[in-house]
Image (cartoon, helix red, strand yellow):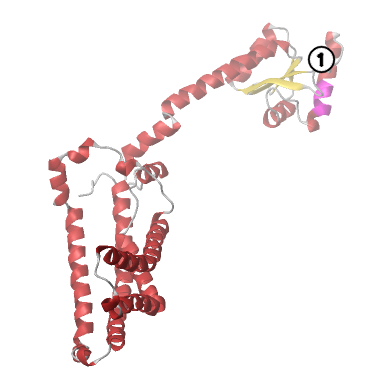
Amino acid sequence: MADPSKTEKATPKKRKEFRKKGSVAKSIEVSTTLVLLLTLLLFRFFGMYIYKQLYNVTQFYFLNINNIPITYDELSNIFLNMLFHTFIIVVPIMLCILLVIILSNIMQFGFLLTLDPIKPNLGKLNFIKGFQNLVSKKSLENLVKTLFKVIFIGYIVYSTIKKDVPIIFTFFDLSIDQSFFIIAKMAGEILYKIVLAFIVIAGMDYAFQRYTLNEQMKMTKQEIKEEHKRSEGDPLIKGAIRRRQMEMARHRMMEEVPKADVVVTNPFHVAVAIRYNAQENRAPVVVAKGIRRIAERIKLLATENNVPIVENPPIARTLYKTSKVGEPIPSEMYSAVADILTYIYKISGKTFGI
């Protein structure tokens, strides 16, 4: 019975884990249907060829049985010869069936190569669990499906043969070829009806297998949270790391304020510290910026280290929004910032750009 707490669809990671274990949506009925369809096609296009080959080999030995010495070596040769002719007919058919089975699996769940299902597992030797599997819901479902198929196929065979019973009683008056054609016609009709029925059965069974697998893979909300923690990291820890990184970056930024040429302010809410060295940078660089408490801290450090503070709200706000710490100011701000730096250099007696 499905766990009622598992209400969430499986994550891609959970689906990948199931697939790795070989737990995929697979219907045996799909493979069976394709094999039956292949058999029908072979019967339709190569039935006469197969019949002629077997007929010729059998006829040869029956016609020449009086001329063949009854010795061990001769009988061995006859057996091997018949086996060889049967082999060259049967093997291509078996290879085609094998190929169809492989293709049917690829159609259902793609190419999958995993050794997990055949790995040694002592749990498989648990007789109690094995008995429970025998009487499980899945075993009951398989039993019901098997009984349904047997009854259904039996009905198709019975209904087809029943209408041809009068013809069957005439076999003794017919040649081997005529009898073969009648039997082949009946077999072809039976196989055709079975294939049509199995196409419907296979479609329904595959849909059921997919539904069952999706139900098995469902997860609880807690399982999804735990998986997210394992794959992405605990949100609390990630938040703490992010805060620590921001604090370190802010600390490094504050260390640059004493080296600034000027701090442009709002004056109360925004502060941007600028430094210009023509030998190192093509334009003035923003070494620190911040709002509210960080802005107050920048202004305090500037005052403590004799860095000039200029109140210019429009330029301060624009620089804060358009610039990044450690990068040159935007080109559209060159003129405005140059005027401020010229003024600062003039009153301090410092050479511009040094």
Residue under numbered circle 1: 344
Residue under the point 40% across and 31% down: 230
- What kind of secondary structure does the magenta stretch mostly adopt? helix
Residue 310: quadrant of the picture: top right
Specify the quadrant that holds the C terminus: top right
- Horizontal and vertical percent position of residue 155: 19, 77
Q: How many marks?
A: 1
- Horizontal and vertical percent position of residue 239: 47, 26
Residue 129: quadrant of the picture: top left
Seen in the picture, residue 26 relative to 71 is either above or below; the reply is above
Seen in the picture, residue 49 relative to 350 is either above or below; the reply is below
Q: Which residues are magenta?
A: 334-340
Relative depth, front residue between 230 and 110: 110
- Horizontal and vertical percent position of residue 190: 28, 79
Q: Is residue 178 left or right of residue 313?
A: left
Residue 153: quadrant of the picture: bottom left
Relative depth, front residue between 216 and 127: 127
* Amino acid type for the residue under numbered disc 1: Ile
Relative depth, front residue between 130 and 167: 167
Residue under the point 15% across and 51% down: 134
Is-magenta flag for residue 335?
yes
Residue under the point 12% across and 42% down: 128
Identify the element where label 1 is drawn: helix
Residue under the point 36% across and 74% down: 40
Is-magenta flag for residue 90?
no
Within-10-Å neighbours for mark 1: few <14, some 14–19, many 20+ = some
Relative depth, front residue between 93 and 190: 93
Seen in the picture, residue 270 relative to 29 is either above or below; the reply is above
- Horizontal and vertical percent position of residue 330: 76, 30
